Every structure is written in structure tokens, then in C-alpha cells.
Image (cartoon, coloured by chain):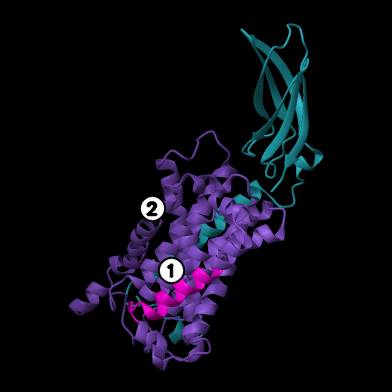
Chain colours: A cyan, B purple
Amino acid sequence: MSARSDRRPEQAAPRWLERAIFWLSLLVVLGVASALVLLDPPWRPDTVAVAPKVGSVAVTRDQQAFVVNYELENLGTASVVQVQVQVTAGDQQVEQTIAYLPNGSKQRASAVLYGVPAGTRPEVRVVGYQMP
Amino acid sequence: MSDTTARATRPLETLRPLIRSLCGGFIFSIPIIYTMEMWSLGHNRPAMQILAFVALSYLVAVGLNYVSGFREAYGWGCAFKDAVETLALGIAVSAVMLVLLGVADANGSAKVFLSQVMMLAIPISIGASLSRSQLGEKGADGDGPEKPAEDERPGWHNDLKDLALTAFGGVFLGFSVAPTEEILLIATQGRWWQALGTIALSLGITYLMLFEARFVGESQRLETPGMFQGAWPETLVTYAVSLGISAYLLWFLGDLPLVPSPSQAIAMTIVLALPVSMGGAVARMIL
């Protein structure tokens, strides 16, 4: 491109400041883009492909309510947005969808069931998940 | 040194386009900055997808800069450089606003924060490009001959200008609509005749806005030379560009990658193309 066509409209202003603004801008754009790629590199394996699984399960009772607190593990870093979980206790069953932000490897959740006899051991299992 | 030259070489003269970009970025993107759906856009998207979206939006800003620079000397080099500066400005403003609004969590993930910053920087930088190239006082940023009038330019330049302005207006209006769940809802509930009616309405309202409503520059538009210049060819091209912009916005911002059937994806694109084509038509009217 000729020198004439590269001339800036505000050419009368100080060239050093004009150049400084451009190079600083380029540095900001490339810096943020590089940081983003390094924090979420495309070459990193997606651990979600292994499938989310249930970690620790704990039970609390609140009068008639039977509360099952559980942790989802192996959620990966960037892909899964929803996990379908089935919680069974005795003859009671509830299915819930856990939506989460993929910024960690674990997600806590709880399910509330009623009419569950004392001493019942709940079963929590992942029945599906969705990836974008 | 004369008094005039002394005034022109003040650092403020160099900063003035940047100041105008900053103000324009705020003016045009403040409704988007205050929208909750926008904050969550960066949460679950891979970095490369976000960067691809930023790159495509950057090209739209370059096209807008090139076709709307006031001076003859304003070439592709200036257009690329200005777009880098407005994108950097968008990143800075976006980061500051996310912190001030309390969206950025000090204990949260750096990846999520940077993703939010990048996604929000796009509308801010597009608004900044618009104000930098369009809303400045003519002659305020330097000397040199002004660009020739529309009818003195080659036809391809007018076609490129129309395409760039349609894409810009469409992206700008569609950006706040594409992430909403309503697009998927409307497309899912709609029947085939409603989709055809939406296409007809999009074409009709675009034609009326550009060629029958007697808005600003209508007679000039009809006389401008170019391959696609003419009422119906322009209307059809505007709608075709709007469909492309809609698919692009829905892919990056909306639910398009999640829908199971192609027919549903097409329906969503048609639904969003109505506001996008209006945005494209408005941009061509006022810019």
C-alpha cells in the first residue's frame, strides 16, 4: 500500500502518540486472546468425555423430608452444561437436571424426597448429560 | 510554527477519535452491557469459539471503517488499524464495566472472566467503530481531500458499502436478541405458513424502509450505480445477508448448535432474520 493511502486522517497529530496507541491496542488484543487460549487450550483433552459421575452422598432428615446431598465429579472444564441425575430412596424416586457453570471439577446438589422410611440408603446415579 | 499547526499537533487531537470511540461504545452498547444473558455467554464456550466470533466481528468493523472513512486517503491499512484500536477499547471498557457492575467474581475463574470480557467487547467495539467513523465532525480529524460522492465511486464500492452496513446493522440489532430463549420458543411453536409469512414480512418491511417510506437518502439510493443497486435486488441481497448474519449470531450466541433438526435451525434463522434485516436497513438509512 502506498504511503499516501496509509496516511491517517489525523496525520497532523503527533506520530509517536498515534503509534503508541496502536501498538498498545494490539498488545491488549493479542494479550487477552493469548491468555484466553492458554486458560482453555483447544489441545487439552475434555475430561467430560469420560462422563460425569456421582461422588460423595450424604443424607439429612428434616421432619418428613429426606434430603440427599451429593456431589457430581469429573465434570471437565468447558463443555457440559446439564447433567440428568436420578435419586432413588426406597420406593421414592426423583429425577433432576443439574445445570452448572463449567469452572470447576465438582458440583454440589441435593434432592428432597418424602415418605422415605428411616435408615433407607439412597442411590444416586447419572442418567445422562448434554454437551453443546 | 503557526497557531493552527500548534493546535493540530496537540496530543488531544490524536486522542479525540479515541475519546469519540469511547463515548460511542458506551452509547450504543449500554443496553447490552446491562443484560444478564450477555454476562453468561462466555461461561460455557470454548476459547477458540469465542475468538472466532471476535475475529468475524472484527472483520465487520474493518468493513464498516473502510466504507465509511471520510477521507480519500483512508485505505484498508487505516481500517484495520482503527478496528484494532476500537477492539482494544472494547476489551478495556468491558473489563471495567464487569468489575463495576459486580459481575466479575474475585474468586471466580479467570477463563470465565476473560470470556465474558471478550464477548461483551464485541458490541462495544462495534459501537465505537460506528461513532469513530460516522459521528465525528467532518474535517475534525485531519486534512486531505474528502472521499468522492456516492455516484462518483466505482459500483463495487457501493455494493461493498451496502453489504458492510447491512452486516453491521444486523449484528448490532441481532446481538441482543440472538441469546434469548424466545427465538427457540417462537421457532418451535411456529408452523410452516408462519415461517413463510415471516420471510414475506422481512422482505416487505425492508423494501418499504429503504425505498418507499421516504426516509433519508432514498432518492440517492435509487440512483447509486452498482451490480446490486436497484429496489428489489437490494432488498433481496439485504435479506440474504440478514439470513447469514442470523445463522452466525445464533451459532455463536444462541441455541443453534443444540437444536436436533435442520428444520428447527432454519426456522430459528428465519425468526431472527426479521429484526436483523430491519437493523441492516436502518444502518443503510442513517449511515
B138 and A15: which one is in front? B138
Drawn side of residue B14 relative to residue B233, left or right: left
Q: Residue at x 31, y 71 (%)?
A: B136
Q: Which residues are magenta?
A: B199-217
Q: Position of residue B132 (x, y in %)?
A: 37, 68
Q: Specify whether residue A100 is painted magenta.
A: no
Side of B234 where B16 appears, left or right = left
Q: Position of residue B156 (x, y in %)?
A: 51, 88
**What residue is shown with label 2?**
B30
Q: Is B185 rendered above or below residue B214?
A: above
Give, as a three-letter code, the residue at label 1.
Arg
Rounded to the nearest angstrom, the CA distance separating label 1 from label 2 is 29 Å
Residue B205 colored in magenta in the image: yes
**In percent of the image, x 41 and y 62: which residue is there?**
B127
Give the amino acid at mark 2.
Answer: Ile
Residue assigned mark 1: A19
User: Is residue A124 placed above or below A22 in the rendered structure?
Assistant: above
